[in-house]
Image (spheres, rainbow, N blue to C red):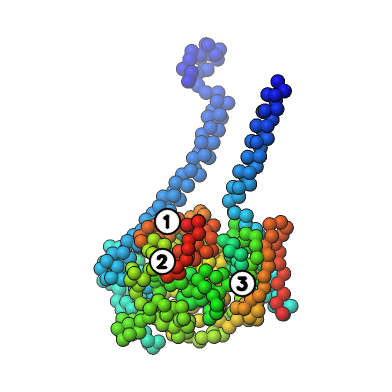
Amino acid sequence: MLGLFMSSFRGLTVLVTLTTLLVGCSDPLGGRMEVSGTVKLKGKSLADGTVSFEPLDGQPTRATVMLTAGEFTIPKPNGLVPGRYMIRVSAGDGKTAVNPVNPDQPPGPSGGTNIISKELIPADWNVDSKQEREIVKTGPNRFEFEIP
Amino acid sequence: MHLNTHPSSHGRGPLGRGFTLIELLVVIAIIAILIGLLLPAVQKVRESAARMKCQNNLKQISLGNMAYENANGTFLPGISRTGCCWGTWQVPILPYIEQHGAFNLYTNFGGLDAGALPPTGPRYNAGTNLTVSSTRMATFTCPSDVPGVIGTITTNNYVLNAGNTSFYQVSIPINCTGGSVTSTTCTTFGGAPFGWYEDPATVAAGGDSSPVAYTTGNPATGLCGRQRKMTDITDGTSNTLMASEVNQGRGGGDYRGFSWWGGGAGFTAYSLPNSIDPDVMTGAACNATPPNAPCTTTSTATRPRMQVARSRHTGGVAVTMCDGSVRFVSNSISVATWRAVSTSQGGEVFAGDW
């Protein structure tokens, strides 16, 4: 009688463990984390622009998120899997083309059809960014970027 | 089951045959539950039928491209004519998707621009060209989306593959050094089956470029694209995207899916499908109010002009490959794989999630 009880108890333990494992493995979002934060340029909230997270450890996720009044949120479904990311902030002035052309025209490698806006963010937060941040599995992934 | 049993057996007298209030309520409740169960299923079937139609359109487009290749020896000319509004890929494909009438109406396709104004002939929005661009074509429309117009000109759902970076078809950030096709910090352009075609006169005068020149192409002075041959797809036609879906902008003033105009006729795989990354619609306008995706009109060196692959389906986008096959790509595809399948000459080794 006791033996029967013990074996069914063991079976139950195995079942519970398996269920936990299966549920643990079936996270449809693949361990993505919500990421949020703020961006300040020279002490002022950056009203308009984007923050990009570029994976440095071969992670499968990346994001370029738009700022709303200096704030950004990458919701969990579009979130980032843990690991190191390079941060790139970009804010064009939207007026000064570094290659002045007719804005009515579509792009293409041929001359005169490309419009790239003047960048307001210094190179070390933009094209030559050395900014690295780690997305972690535990705790809120909230970042406050202060660009000098 | 026993509706007609003898009334006296239940002791209800002559009026006893029929339902009691409780029975009626139970039946109504059961019907309500059944409807509740069935309606979502019907909705799902409707969406899955729409998705099938949508994928079938992609199949028609890729077969049209194949038929064009058969007849001309090259893929469709490209996404759009370099310069301005001189006709996108949607024009030369017309005879191959049984739209000869519309094709014959369209004039000045790929017409000369040479940076000079006034233009040398009607654009997509003038004369009989307007009749064509205002025609709602089922093959260019995904039934999962809401058909839209800008003025009278239709917005559409399918766009050609412009590669792994931006519409400029150079590295991101533009002019970065020391990068590679697989790098996430300096991503070089790995070739694409479609570019921005030059007018025939320029090409005849030796103005075409090999895809190799793209990698050194300067966004301001780079060389024009030439029509790709099957053999230019060195990654293999089964490993290279041909076309994808985008969503038509809603609410007015949104040029996403405005594919009679060059800036709305292509997509790149720099950003993941259906991601929160903005579409960069420089030279046009966009409206980021949901359900439209985020967007901006400001193109910068690190966030250049691009349209992101998007759909109204759940969980991913439908795409077609250069070999004519159609597949459904999950939103959770890895950055490396998504970019690898967009390049035509990247030489990448595929990860396990393709």
Near mark 2 (Cα within 10 A), the count class, few <14, some 14-19 or many ≥20, is many
* Mark 3 chain: A
Residue B323 in the image, given as x and y percentages of width and height: 36, 61
Residue type for callout 1 = Arg
The residue under the point 62% across, 61% down is A80
Q: How many angstroms separate mark 3 from mark 1 (CA)?
A: 31 Å
- Residue at the spot x=62%, y=57% of the render? A32
Q: Position of residue B216 (x, y in %)?
A: 46, 81
Q: Where does the image place residue A10, in percent across and percent down from the top left?
A: 68, 32
Q: Between marks 2 and 1, how big is the CA–CA gap?
A: 18 Å
Local SS, label 3? strand
Q: Which residue is mark 1?
A: B327
Of the pair B305 and B3, the residue shown nearer to us: B305
- Determine the CA span between mark 3 and mark 2: 33 Å
* SS label for mark 1: strand
User: Which circle, 2 or 1, is nearer the viewer?
Assistant: 2
What amino acid type is highlighted by mark number 2? Asp
Please tell me how crowded label 1 is: few (under 14), some (14-19), or many (20+) other residues with Cα within 10 Å. some
Give the letter of the chain under mark 2. Answer: B
Q: Residue at x 60, y 78 (%)?
A: A127
Can you tell which of label 3 and label 2 is closer to the viewer? 2
Answer above or below: position of B87 versus A82.
Answer: below
In-front residue for pair A73/B337:
B337
- Residue at x-position 60% and y-position 81%: A119
Q: Nearer the viewer, residue B242 or A98?
A: B242
Q: Mark 2 = which residue?
A: B235
Q: Label 1 marks which chain's residue?
A: B
Q: Residue under circle 3?
A: A50
